[in-house]
Amino acid sequence: MGVVYKGWQPLLERNVAIKVVRPDLLSDPDSQQRFLAEARTLARLVHPYIVTVFDCGRVDDLYFLVMEFVEGSSLRQLLEQKKITERDAVDIVQQIGEALEHAHGRGVVHRDVKPENVLIDQRDRVRLVDFGLAKLFAGRDPQSSGDHLVVGTPRYMAPEQIAMPGDIDQRADIYSTGVVFHEMLTGELPGPRRQPPSAIAATNNRLDPIVLRAIEPDRDRRYQQARELNADLASVSRTDDSTIKLERTIAASPDEVFAAWTNPAVMVNWFAPSDDFATPIAEVDLQVAGKYRVGMRNPNGNVHIVSGQYCRVDPPNSLCFTWAWDTPRRDSHETQVTLEIRPHGDGTNLTFTHERFRDSALREDHAKGWTGCLDRLVRKLSK
């Protein structure tokens, strides 16, 4: 439906992606309306794993979208180059699942999840793109007059997208995600006789029931929510080699613990691995897709800066954010931190999970740093 160009935004000095309606569809009012519907859909979906829309406009008869430019490759390109490992596949599906959980929570079903619509940036972060076929299932979308039509990409579409296209919900996206997962693990799309991936390729058989449940033809027997798929994936992906998990009991309320991670005035008092460090930088934009930046100055006077974006914000119960060092060495692979905060008597239990490590030495280094950070947090808040 669209053509995408790489552009340059001079005032902000950044690359952007500019999407316009295909020239041969300019006279088609339905295509114009669907293009506008995509813009409106993306405007309501702000998440680190969904491509960001910056602007939408019209010049004469030409509508355009200005979007985040993702420096990287599409999942289709990586599959063709045979560059996807099993660990890659699990990480990618978990990120797709988080993007879909966010979209579904706002009543949006994508309807066209496939490798061409999944971009992977240079730090291995996913961006789900192309919401041109999206519909609102939690209430009628006045712009979606074609919701009764069969739309999507054959072999990635859930059976109900063909049998009853007017009655589609989030489970259709889960099916498509399962097909993509199967393809990443085996190099093949699922056949009519559903075989577990480990029967086709040398993959972890613990992934078999997850894939088979995601591509279950009967949607009532499929995963009902993306978060269920992600929970099962986490049980497999959170290994000793890839994950840090630490727990602390803190003599402070859940609100105080949550504020310690999100209030810059509190963060500067503890957010460093030891008392030999200072924290001169703590910047927070506390919302989904909001950015944070923390700088820790070591005893030599060098400031190490980490940054990321918030994936989930549920005060005071949980917080999830991406993590990557910017200086002194820029991380080539982004990881993710999840905090679970629960009342415990007069205090609070904090469960800290840092996952998606690809380097065991880096994981060990982070584990030492986070142990020091959390010990400082306990001391500071317990005074």
Image: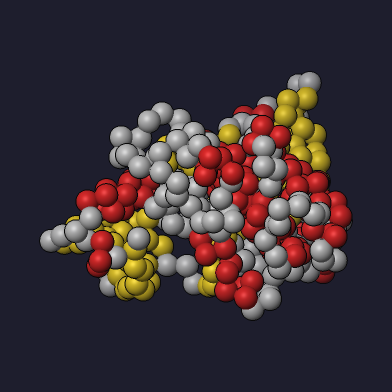
88 w.r.t. 372: above or below: below
The residue at the point 22 percent across, 51 percent down is 29
Q: Is residue 351 visible?
A: yes
Placement of the C terminus among the 4 image quadrants: top right
- Of residues 320 and 158, the one nearer the viewer is 158
- Rendered location of residue 185, percent (x, y): 74, 63
Across and down, in percent, residue 236 comes to 81, 50
Q: Nearer the viewer, residue 213 or 226?
A: 213
| Relative side of 268 to 243, left or right | left
Q: How many numbered tags mark residues here?
A: 0
Is 293 displayed left or right of 3 in the figure? right
Horizontal and vertical percent position of residue 139: 41, 28
> Colour mode?
secondary structure
Q: Residue at x 37, y 30 (%)?
A: 140
Foreground of the two, 330 or 260: 330
Say which quarter of the image contains residue 314.
top right
Instruction: State the image quarter where residue 56 is shown.
Output: bottom left
At 59% from the left and 39% from the top, the residue drawn is 171
Position of 265 with respect to 225 (left or right) is: left
Is residue 307 found left or right of 277 in the rendered image? Answer: left
